[in-house]
Image: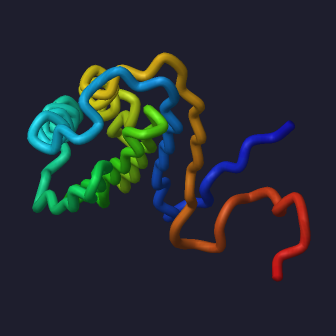
């Protein structure tokens, strides 16, 4: 299997999405999660512009961190001990896994499923052709 490489002049954008199962942390803990997002961003020198969120009734939380380098989204379902985390970084030198570490410490998942994507922006896209027809 070949790996797509960005063409000259194309930007590489990294996206990490985590499905987190069996979370034992406080899934309604807005303050703790905001602080974890900020710690993760500091770990890679990402700049937080603003964090907005909504605490659902009777439970659940969504936080969106707007970064100069793109964004982070955390959504929780306490009734299922489940959370998702999306980290989208436009700077290829920044490691989304390092951003995730403090968030994972707060959520305390028993199991995680990772989805990693790399987007090639600019130029004409990746060098290899997509697997299926483009519609």
Classify the position of the N terminus by image quarter.
top right
Side (left or right) of 98 relative to 48? right
| Residue 104 at x, y percent in the picture | 34, 26
Say whether residue 48 is visible.
Answer: yes
Toward which corner of the image does residue 116 lie, by quadrant? top right
Toward which corner of the image does residue 66 lie, by quadrant? bottom left
Side (left or right) of 100 relative to 6? left
- Coloring scheme used: rainbow
Q: Residue furthest bottom?
A: 135
Point 15% across, 44% down: residue: 30
Side (left or right) of 30 relative to 135? left
| Residue 110 at x, y percent in the picture | 48, 17
Classify the position of the C terminus by image quarter.
bottom right
Say whether residue 91 is visible.
Answer: no
In the image, 113 versus 60, the foreground residue is 60
Q: Residue furthest top?
A: 110
In the image, 40 versus 80, the foreground residue is 80
Q: Is residue 73 above or below residue 31?
A: below
| Residue 128 at x, y percent in the picture | 80, 57
| Residue 92 at x, y percent in the picture | 40, 45
In the image, 95 versus 8, the foreground residue is 95
Q: How many marks?
A: 0
Point 81% across, 40% down: residue: 2
Point 37% across, 39% down: residue: 78
In the image, 48 versus 20, the foreground residue is 20
Q: Is residue 122 above or below residue 59?
A: below
Q: Residue furthest right?
A: 132
């Amino acid at each position: 299997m070949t790996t797509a490489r960005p063409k000259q002049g194309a930007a590489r954008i990294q996206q990490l999405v985590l499905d987190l199962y069996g979370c034992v942390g406080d899934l309604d803990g807005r303050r703790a999660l905001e602080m974890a997002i900020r710690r993760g961003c500091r770990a890679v020198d990402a700049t937080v512009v603003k964090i907005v969120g909504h605490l659902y009734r009777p439970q659940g939380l969504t936080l969106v961190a707007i970064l100069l380098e793109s964004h982070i989204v955390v959504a929780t379902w306490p009734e299922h001990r489940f959370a998702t985390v999306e980290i989208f970084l436009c700077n290829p030198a920044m490691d989304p896994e390092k951003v995730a570490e403090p968030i994972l410490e707060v959520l305390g998942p028993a199991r995680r499923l990772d989805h990693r994507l790399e987007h090639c922006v600019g130029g004409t896209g990746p060098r290899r052709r997509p697997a299926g027809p483009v519609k």
